């Protein structure tokens, strides 16, 4: 009985082995969570965070050429094109463009970017920048001068427009602040007249200007959450039904829609 079970088991393994195609993914499939982990490992190995300032600004698939993909589609039993990822990282205050070859398990291209423009902002550095205003003495004084509550102030960081001036090496964002106090619709209550800029690499406010005091709009009528809205309401919409008796007209296979 045991011998028979082993025979059936190995027969199933061989059956599965020969049924599975040689390609395990489409060349344009998005990177998987495990691949992101591998990429992080490859990049951080030569630049350990214990001795380097390293942040990942962008990680995405380095797509193969169109001709390569078309060639693979004509014969899907062939070996998959090299699986690669394109990485934009900030390493010790410099922007690096990196290509990681997941098939070879190594970095195959790396260069320092010195051109115009800067990489995407990360959520972490934006959050850190937004917290600077609440402890900056000049900003705290300006809020007090306006008779506002500091704990009701929220700030956001935004990239600065480039007007063709000489390229600057610093990554600078502009800080804009808003007043809650009775509403969550912060965009409706900007604190105007105050200008702040933040150096993201140094993570400090490098410019502050309080030009003028502008009245802040009232919070009345700015609520948008359904649970907080009060009558009168507009008439309710009539019910709508969408039916596909024969099912959808497409199939989803992995990352493909057919």
Image (cartoon, rainbow, N blue to C red):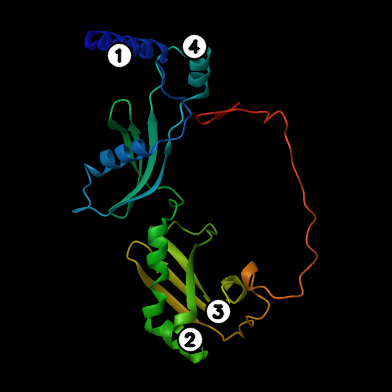
Which image quarter is the C terminus in? top right
Residue 242 x/y as whole percent: 74, 41
**Which numbered disc flags the more N-terminal residue, 4 or 1?**
1
Q: CA distance from mark 2 to mark 4?
A: 67 Å
* Residue 228 in which image quadrant: bottom right
Using a 10 Å C-alpha cutoff, classify the residue at mark 3 as few (fewer than 14 neighbours), some (14 to 19) or many (20 or more).
many
- Residue topped by disc 1: 9
Q: Which dot marks residue 149?
A: 2
Q: CA distance from mark 3 to mark 2?
A: 12 Å
* Residue 197 in which image quadrant: bottom left
Which image quarter is the N terminus in? top left
Q: Is residue 80 visible?
A: yes
Q: Looking at the image, is mark 3 or mark 4 nearer the viewer?
A: 4
Residue 246 x/y as whole percent: 71, 28
Q: Is residue 144 above or below residue 206?
A: below
- Residue topped by disc 3: 191
**Which numbered disc flags the more N-terminal residue, 3 or 4?**
4
Q: Secondary structure at mark 1?
A: helix
Q: CA distance from mark 4 to mark 1?
A: 31 Å
Q: Nearer the viewer, residue 38 or 62?
A: 38
Residue farthest along the left direction in this orientation: 51
Q: Is residue 48 left or right of residue 33?
A: left
**Which numbered disc flags the more N-terminal residue, 3 or 2?**
2
Q: Which dot marks residue 75?
A: 4
Q: Is residue 256 left or right of residue 249?
A: left
Q: Looking at the image, is mark 2 or mark 1 nearer the viewer?
A: 1
Q: Is residue 244 left or right of residue 122?
A: right
Q: CA distance from mark 2 to mark 1?
A: 71 Å
Residue farthest along the front direction in this orientation: 1
Q: Nearer the viewer, residue 251 or 30?
A: 251
Q: Looking at the image, is mark 4 or mark 1 nearer the viewer?
A: 1
Residue 84 x/y as whole percent: 38, 30
């Amino acid at each position: 009985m045991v011998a028979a079970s082993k025979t059936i088991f190995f027969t199933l393994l061989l059956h599965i082995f020969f049924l599975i195609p040689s390609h395990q993914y489409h060349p344009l499939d998005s990177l998987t969570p495990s691949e992101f982990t591998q990429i992080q490992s490859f990049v951080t190995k030569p630049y350990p965070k214990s001795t380097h300032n390293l942040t990942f600004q962008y990680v995405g698939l380095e797509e193969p050429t169109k001709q390569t993909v078309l060639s693979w589609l004509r014969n899907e039993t062939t070996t998959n094109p090299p699986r690669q990822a394109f990485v934009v990282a900030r390493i010790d205050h410099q922007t690096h463009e990196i290509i990681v070859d997941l098939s070879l398990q190594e970095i195959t291209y790396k260069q320092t970017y010195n051109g115009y423009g800067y990489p995407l902002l990360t959520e972490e550095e934006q959050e850190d920048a937004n917290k600077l205003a609440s402890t900056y003495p000049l900003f705290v004084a300006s809020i007090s001068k306006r008779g506002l509550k500091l704990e009701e102030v929220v700030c956001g960081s935004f990239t600065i427009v480039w007007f063709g001036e000489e390229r600057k090496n610093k990554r600078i964002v502009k800080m804009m602040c808003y007043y809650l106090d009775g509403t969550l619709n912060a965009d409706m209550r900007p604190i105007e007249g105050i200008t702040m800029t933040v150096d993201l690499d140094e993570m400090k406010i490098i410019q502050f200007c309080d030009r003028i005091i502008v009245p802040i709009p009232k919070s009345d009528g700015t609520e948008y959450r359904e649970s907080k809205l009060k009558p009168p309401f507009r008439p309710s919409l009539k019910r709508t039904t969408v039916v596909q008796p024969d099912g959808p007209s497409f199939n989803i296979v992995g990352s493909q829609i057919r």
